[in-house]
Image (spheres, rainbow, N blue to C red):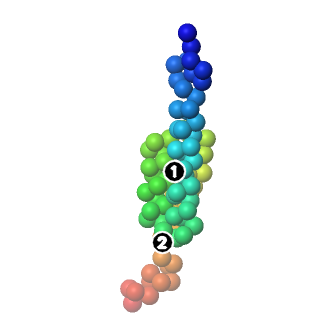
């Protein structure tokens, strides 16, 4: 006897929940990124990649992670002015 909503012993709601969790993790990181809270965005994007390394948007998350690090850098002119 099989239960409705089960495929190969896995519930479809579990798969759906996992998809929502991945999307939520990305959107939280994206919100931090857009608010220029880059340190928090980095944490969220790194957590996404730790939990969902083969997700279909993992490449986008890696890009956003790199941009979060890049946007934290000071401009070269500002950095050089403090050394004089």
Question: Which of 33/28 is in front?
Answer: 28
Asked if residue 58 shows in the view, the reply is: no
Residue that lies at the very extreme toward the left in this rendered image: 83
Q: Dot 2: what SS?
A: loop
In this rendering, the answer to whether 16 lies above or below 57 is: above
Q: Residue at x 44, y 81 (%)?
A: 79
Left/right of residue 56 with respect to residue 25 in the rendered view:
right
Q: Residue at x 60, y 20 (%)?
A: 4
Q: Residue at x 55, y 62 (%)?
A: 31
Disc marking residue 58: none
Q: If the image is split into quadrants, where does the N terminus sit?
A: top right
In this rendering, the answer to whether 75 lies above or below 38 is: below
Residue on which the image places disc 1: 25
x and y, in percent, of residue 75 in the image: 51, 78
Residue that lies at the very extreme toward the top in this rendered image: 1
Reading the chain from its start, which is encountered first: label 2 or label 1? 1
Q: Dot 1: what SS?
A: helix
In this rendering, the answer to whether 26 lies above or below 78 is: above
Asked if residue 75 shows in the view, the reply is: yes
Give the crowd class for mark 1: few <14, some 14-19, many >=20 residues within 10 Å.
some
Residue on which the image places disc 2: 73
In this rendering, the answer to whether 44 lies above or below 2 is: below
x and y, in percent, of residue 39 in the image: 43, 65
């Amino acid at each position: 006897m099989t239960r409705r909503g089960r495929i190969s012993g896995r519930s479809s709601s579990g798969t759906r929940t996992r998809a929502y969790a991945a999307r939520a993790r990305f959107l939280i990181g994206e919100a931090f990124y857009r608010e220029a809270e880059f340190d928090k965005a980095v944490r969220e994007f790194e957590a996404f990649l730790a939990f969902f390394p083969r997700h279909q948007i993992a490449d986008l998350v890696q890009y956003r992670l790199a941009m979060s690090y890049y946007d934290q850098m000071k401009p070269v002119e500002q950095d050089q002015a403090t050394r004089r």
